Amino acid sequence: MKTAKHPNDEADLPEEDSKPPAKRPRRKAAIKSEKLIAGMAEEDDDVKKPPAKRPRRNKKAALKSEEPAEDDDASDQMNKSKKRSSKESAPIPVDAMVNVMEFLPPRSLYNIALTCKSLREMVTTKMVVQSALIHGGNPSKSMTELHSLMRNHSIHVPSPLRLLRLANGKRCEFCLTSGTNHVRPGLGVFACWNCVVSGKQGRWNRGYSRNSGSSSIKLTKAWKTSWVRYRKNPIYRTILSYSRVASNEYGTNHYFWSEHRCDVSGERVGPLVTWGDVDDLKGYYDQLKTAAAAKEAAAANSTVDSATTSNVAAADNGNDNEEEEEAAPSLSNGEWIEYYLTKNLNAPPKENYAEFNETFTNTVQMADRISREREELKKSKRDDKMQTKVDKVEKILDDLKALINEPFRERAMKAYGKEKYLKSGMSSNQCMFLETPFINAWLAPYIKSPSKMTKKAMKEMAEKINVEIERIEKLLEMDFLSDDDDFEAAAKIFFRECYPDVEALYTCHSSYHGPTNMMTEEFVTLIQGGRFIGALCYLQTNNLSPILLVTEPSASLAQASKYLDETSLKKLAKIAWYQTNREDDSWAAEAFAAGHKFFGEAMAKVDKYGAWLEGKVDEDKRPAFLNKIVMGYWYFDDFMKEEDFEKIWKNNARLVRS
């Protein structure tokens, strides 16, 4: 059986189809280069090599190639000198850094000490104390608090690096809470108040104490002098008053270091004596006292007959007990406390405190002098800065005054407060104030920062002030008030008497502070809004009650004056004026009409009530009684509401007795 052949089988294909497939056509660039080479070969039998690629050049090589050849020698010598100088320049010796570190502030000293081990070993106690005291601030405060403990030899002597950390502290070293500025007084550690008193853990130490040798983060514990053991054992007074026993006394309590602690590096920190050591000292004292009593009793029991035997035994045992007899401290002074601190608490010898105390004593006077000089220099610079600011502001006001219209130039731009500003020492305050309130408010940003005042801003400000002064002049002409209206006619007479010119506006209103200028920004805003009557009312603090008295019929005033004096009449007119309270300009006219109505009703009722009192109050006491009712706001309010005179009499009978 014949198998079927594939259609592409070569045996069955024609001769043309049996050839291999054609190659991909060559690129035009390759064909062109071949033709070019063939043409050059025909002209010359020696085929030339293609030119070498030009090397890439940087800027330095280009500049060097462009320089003239005669400068090559000079540049080579310069390069050689640079290499020679770089090789021959030796770094600063490490030993010389000590002289540099002595003049650094605490923060810079701390940073340079962390650079390497050799610099860290160069830091000394003297270097840290001098740097902290001379540069002042919180480091100086920390050194002062440490000195109060170091001079009594009552804390563990801090190493130079720990002293440097205390001088640069920013956080509590136990709970890492920020806000701790200096060493805690009486403890000598960098601790916050919460850790000292309550042991409250902060957000940085949830559930653990940062100190390696402490079981509780509470740093102090109260030892109370009200306890029975304190009153029955006088030795406690000796212990608490000893210089090397540190505690903070508050009332009847002595707050001691709660337990012995170490910092993160394993160094002992804090006071030598803790809360528990107080009772241990008392027990040690009892032990010494018992041993001394036993020794005295044994000596008393020895007889004369055994004197020889005792001398021989004493000679034999003298060498064995010699150390014990010499080691027994005296109980008459604090020697036994010193012995206990040295042997049981590993207290440092007093010689270790000498370097800190001597450095502090020798440096504190120089530090105070430098601090005073620093403050004087700072004050001198501040005063110069303030004086310069005042000079700039005065020049601005003088230039601005020249652009103000002539009639009101001096008065509108009159300023005060320069002397008070220079004495205050606060350079950020406004150095001068203008007597015209709205001008002062507009110029306040430029007075605080004189550099903001440009020529354009000054010109615009002058135009703005001139426009407002012209509006105030037109306001005082009172042309907008009509003579046909009773209120407006009376208001025109009243305001023209109060403000005959612009000068009168500067002392228009009096208060318990003295004359007050009412030309504020609110006053100007009322004028700009066309509320002229509202602006005039604003000058009188919206109180136009004097107009009521002027326009009230004389007959009613004569009737009211039978019982009320001038002060009570003014008070009554003021109460009547405020019966209507509106914020538009029609408020004044309505208040005028309502005030007259209320004023007439009030005076009629006063006159009627005065006649009713003829049989109850003497005639000479009756006016005083009625005046007290009017002057007392709450009494008068009830008086106007109540119709029954008998109830009024009962409610106000105590005024007669007074």
Image: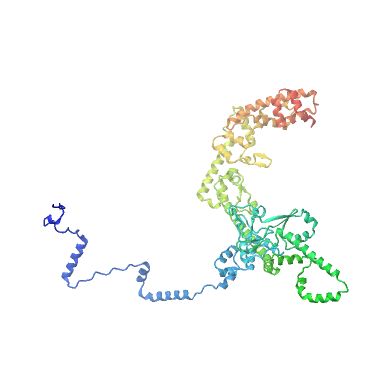
Which of 617/486 is in front?
617
The answer, for residue 553, to whether it is visible in the render is: no
Image quadrant occupied by the C terminus: top right
Image position of 435 with respect to 139: above or below: above
Q: Quadrant of residue 135?
A: bottom right
**How many numbered discs sit on the rendered protein?**
0
Q: Quadrant of residue 583?
A: top right
Which of 398/168 is in front?
168
Instruction: Give the residue drawn at x 67%, y 40%.
Output: 511
Instruction: Give the residue drawn at x 81%, y 75%.
Output: 313
x, y percent for residue 655: 77, 30
x, y percent for residue 137: 63, 60
Image position of 66 with respect to 634: above or below: below
Colouring of the image: rainbow
x, y percent for residue 306: 86, 74
The residue furthest front is 1
Q: Is residue 69 left or right of residue 593?
A: left
Q: Quadrant of residue 111?
A: bottom right
x, y percent for residue 63: 37, 69
The residue furthest left is 15
Q: Is residue 317 left or right of residue 261?
A: right
Q: Is residue 286 left or right of residue 91?
A: right
Image position of 210 with respect to 60: above or below: above
Q: Is residue 256 left or right of residue 165?
A: right
Instruction: Give the residue drawn at x 56%, y 38%.
Output: 525
The answer, for residue 247, to whether it is visible in the render is: yes
Which of 304/136 is in front?
304
